[in-house]
Image: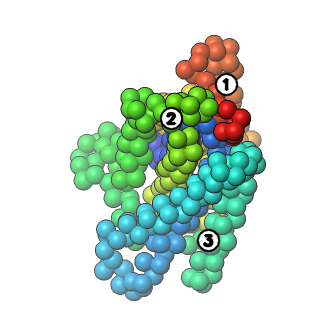
Amino acid sequence: MIATLFQRAIMQGIPLLCGATGEILTEKSGNLNLGIPGIMYVGGISGVIGGFLYESSFMGHKEDMNGFLAILIPLVCCVVGSLLMGLIYAFLTTTMRANQNVTGLALTTFGVGFGNFFGGSLIKLTGSSMPSITLSKTSEFFCQSLPIAEDLGWFGQIFLSHGFLAYLAIILAVGTGVMLKRTRVGLHLRAVGESPATADAAGINVGRYKYAATCIGSVIAGLGGLYYVMDYANGIWSNDAFGDRGWLAIAIVIFALWKPNLAIPASILFGGLYIVHNYIPGIDFSTQELIKMAPYVLTILVLIVISIIDRRENQPPAALGLNYFREER
């Protein structure tokens, strides 16, 4: 049972890791994108639309589906959908200088509505009696694990039995951390987030970095939505099934102290806390809800601790949430 709990904690944590990594990258540029929940939702439904169109074209002959295309089409649709959401946010906050908090919340509302509308439309097209759509064959390609997983016992079950998107999420988190800390691009990006006026005076294109970080961060977050549907939920899309995972991803940004590498264990921890009540026998509903509050309580405690310690490297970017007006430099 312990091995199963850890395996499911990792599966639960991967969407959170994608959302947190994307938000950390975005916030390092000074943009506070509270639209991450909506972007993850759009990424998920965009992948479902692509997968549905491809799988439907093989109705009755799904064994003839090409595995490469079955993965590529939903993946490209997910990237395009989440990228468009990132572009909308970047345009409104960087070019039009709209309020970042309001814009992010509007994107979340729009993303959830977008997903529910098209999800409901696909369900009607299938004529399903259940309020869900199932892409079982497409999910099989996404869920394929390493062939040696079954031969390595509990180690293989916990660490090697996941689809490729899980390992991609970890690689993206590690790569983002290395980029931010050890590359010239990362230095420039952090400079934009700390003091855009100073970065601008040094010849750094502030708008370009904000656009790039926001759009790439949105794509990474969108992959979390695709993973949830195709891997964690076995290809089943149900409206509003994503829950509060997008907000948990934002909480992990604070818990991980804006460090992508720390977001990896933090996501697994939050994922485990999110489902641990299923593995505790004899607890009632109210106790389950209290356990589900644990990630948010931990985040509040971390906020209190970092506020008391007040070490600069553990603080958010100084210009986070503030629009840059070049004429006021």
64 left or right of 286? left
Residue at image position (56%, 61%) is 84
Q: Give x and y (percent) for residue 87.
A: 58, 56
How far separated are the C-alphas under marks 3 and 2? 46 Å
149 left or right of 112? left
Q: Is residue 94 visible in the rendered structure shown here?
A: yes
Give the quadrant of the C terminus: top right
Q: Give x and y (percent) for residue 168.
A: 38, 48
Residue at image position (38%, 32%) is 183
Going by the picture, which residue comes out furthest to the top?
309
Q: Which mark is residue 203?
A: 2
Q: Give x and y (percent) for residue 144.
A: 33, 58
Q: Secondary structure at mark 2?
A: loop
For disc 3, the marked residue is 119
Which of disc 3 and disc 1 is earlier in sequence? 3
How far separated are the C-alphas under marks 1 and 3? 37 Å
Q: Give x and y (percent) for residue 234.
A: 47, 62
Mark 3: amino acid:
Gly
For disc 1, the marked residue is 303
Q: Is residue 19 visible in the rendered structure shown here?
A: no
> Do the CB atoms of the residues marked 1 and 3 lie less than 8 Å apart?
no
Residue at image position (38%, 59%) is 143
Going by the picture, which residue comes out furthest to the bottom?
60
Mark 2: amino acid:
Gly
> Do the CB atoms of the residues marked 3 and 2 lie less than 8 Å apart?
no
Vertical placement of residue 34 versus 114, above or below: above
Badge 1: few (under 14), some or many (20 or more) residues near its Cα, within 10 Å?
some
